[in-house]
Image (cartoon, rainbow, N blue to C red):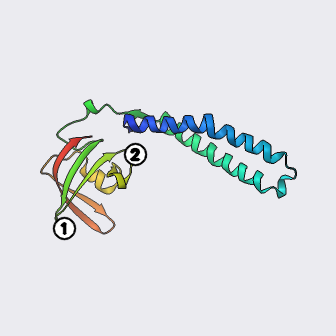
């Protein structure tokens, strides 16, 4: 079971609805049109439509599984004094004194450019459950990072 923010759950639901109601019917129309053009073995349009159909079906099935095995997390039920899912954490890398700020999210919401890291990432996993002032040790490919938690807020 995975937990998603309400926003991400709604985004996934909207993408799924768009694929089922708009994209897939268009692909079926494209396949019908390409089939009508004759020999399928030499028909690039038909092969392209089949590839699009397979990719779309795959994406639809994936999104259905994500929604089937996900629950929307209630932010009010999360601890306010410890790092948890949907926490915005500011921390200092003790070896470089660099300060960073990330939101801890599920793997389906991860977006480094938006400052969102997965709770399954080495840094996210090391921060989980820690309080302000505590030091987390994250095992990363370059070694061990020692991170001091400066602040925690709920996203």
Query: Along the line of sight, which residue is nearer the eye, 12 or 79?
Result: 12
Residue behind mark 2? 109
Residue 122 vertical placement versus 119 (above, below): below
Q: Does residue 53 appear left or right of residue 154 in this picture? A: right
Instruction: Give the residue displayed 25% in from the left and 65% down from the top.
Output: 144
The answer to whether residue 1 of the structure is visible from this angle is no
| Mark identifier at residue 80 | none
Q: Does residue 11 appear left or right of residue 139 in this picture? A: right
**Quarter of the view holding residue 153:** top left
**Quarter of the view holding residue 81:** top left
Q: The N terminus is located in which quarter?
A: top left
As helix, strand or loop, the secondary structure at mark 1 comes to loop
Residues at marks 1 and 2, CA–CA distance in whole angstroms: 28 Å
Residue 87, percent from left and from top: 26, 43
Residue 141 vertical placement versus 135 (above, below): below
Disc 1: CA contacts within 10 A as few (<14), some (14-19) or many (>=20): few
Q: The C terminus is located in which quarter?
A: top left
Residue 146, percent from left and from top: 20, 61
Mark 1 vs mark 2: which is more N-terminal?
1
Q: Residue pushed farthest left?
A: 133
| Mark identifier at residue 96 | 1
Query: Along the line of sight, which residue is nearer the eye, 37 or 71?
Result: 37
């Amino acid at each position: 079971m995975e937990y998603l923010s309400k926003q991400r759950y709604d985004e996934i639901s909207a993408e799924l609805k768009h694929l089922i109601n708009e994209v897939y019917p268009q692909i079926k129309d494209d396949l019908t049109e390409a089939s009508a053009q004759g020999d399928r073995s030499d028909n690039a349009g038909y092969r392209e439509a089949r590839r699009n159909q397979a990719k779309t079906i795959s994406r639809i099935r994936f999104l259905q599984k994500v929604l089937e095995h996900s629950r929307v997390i209630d932010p009010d039920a999360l601890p306010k004094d410890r790092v948890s899912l949907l926490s915005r954490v500011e921390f200092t890398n003790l070896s470089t004194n660099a300060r960073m700020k990330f939101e801890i999210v599920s793997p389906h919401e991860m977006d480094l450019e938006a400052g969102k890291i997965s709770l399954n990432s080495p840094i996210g996993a090391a921060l989980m459950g820690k309080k302000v002032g505590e030091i987390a040790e994250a095992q990363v490919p370059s070694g061990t990072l020692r991170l001091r938690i400066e602040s925690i807020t709920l996203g």
